[in-house]
């Protein structure tokens, strides 16, 4: 018979080496954790210092921006006050008194700051437009009304005349 072959798959080492490697790994892990905590604290301190410096640098700029915002709000409030104090009703009443059935107003664009009004409308005949301009000049807050331009709508079967009138608007409170 053949002799029996015994194979030992486990190598028997010195158990002290295993314990030594385990302790060394644990010490290295503890050292890495402590180093990480120390670095995180340093980063926090530097970030706080940087934020304090940026807040100090931004304070004058923020105060100036806030000052500009207040000035802007004041000017906007003054503009709203001027708009509310403008006698809009007188303007529209004078436009109503000057209008007739021969003229249809399409848009009225008043500019209170410049004291002007732009009026766009339609009429069937040129004479109706001229009569409307004459009546506008006779109305109290309006004056210096003049015809800026006319155009005939060729696409429309009735061929109305579209006109634009510019007028001066005397604003009296």
Image: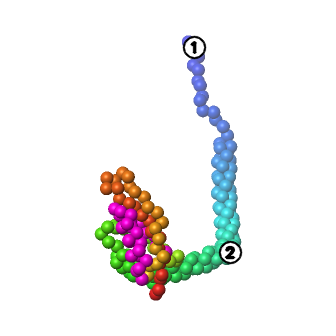
Mark 1 → mark 2, Cα distance in angstroms: 92 Å
Mark with earlier residue (1, 2): 1
Residue at 42% across, 64% down: 163
Q: Label 1 crowding class (10 Å Cα cut-off): few <14, some 14-19, many 20+? A: few
Residue 144 percent coordinates (x, y):
48, 76
Residue 83 percent coordinates (x, y):
46, 79
Q: Residue furthest front?
A: 127
- Which residues are drawn in magenta? 116-140
Is residue 138 covered in magenta?
yes
Residue at 31% across, 56% down: 158
Q: Which mark is residue 57?
A: none
Q: Residue furthest left?
A: 101
Is residue 156 covered in magenta?
no
Q: Secondary structure beneath disc 1?
A: loop
Q: Quadrant of the N terminus?
A: top right
Picture layout, residue 20 above or below residue 116: above
Residue 125 percent coordinates (x, y):
35, 63
Q: Secondary structure beneath disc 2?
A: helix
Residue at the disc numbered 1:
2
Answer whether residue 122 is visible to the viewer in this image.
no
Residue at the disc numbered 2:
56
Q: Nearer the viewer, residue 54 or 106?
A: 106
Q: Label 2 crowding class (10 Å Cα cut-off): few <14, some 14-19, many 20+? A: few
Picture layout, residue 172 above or below residue 52: below
Answer whether residue 139 is visible to the viewer in this image.
yes
Q: Nearer the viewer, residue 31 or 106?
A: 106
Is 135 left or right of 55, judged from the image as shown? left
| Quarter-of-image position of residue 66 | bottom right
Residue 155 percent coordinates (x, y):
36, 51
């Amino acid at each position: 018979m053949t002799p029996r072959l015994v194979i030992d798959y486990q190598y028997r080492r010195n158990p002290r080496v295993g314990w030594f490697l385990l302790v060394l790994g644990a010490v290295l892990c503890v050292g890495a954790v402590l180093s990480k905590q120390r670095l995180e604290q340093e980063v926090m301190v530097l970030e706080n210092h940087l934020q304090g410096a940026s807040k100090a640098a931004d304070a004058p700029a923020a105060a100036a921006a806030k000052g500009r915002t207040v000035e802007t709000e004041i000017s906007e409030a003054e503009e709203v006050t001027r708009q509310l104090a403008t006698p809009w009703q007188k303007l529209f009443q004078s436009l109503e008194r000057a209008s007739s059935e021969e003229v249809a107003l399409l848009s009225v664009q008043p500019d209170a700051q410049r004291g002007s009004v732009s009026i766009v409308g339609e009429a069937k005949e040129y004479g109706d437009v001229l009569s409307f301009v004459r009546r506008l000049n006779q109305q109290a807050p309006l004056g210096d009304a003049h015809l800026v331009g006319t155009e005939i709508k060729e696409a429309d079967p009735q061929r109305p005349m579209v006109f634009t009138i510019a007028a001066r608007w005397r604003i009296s409170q």
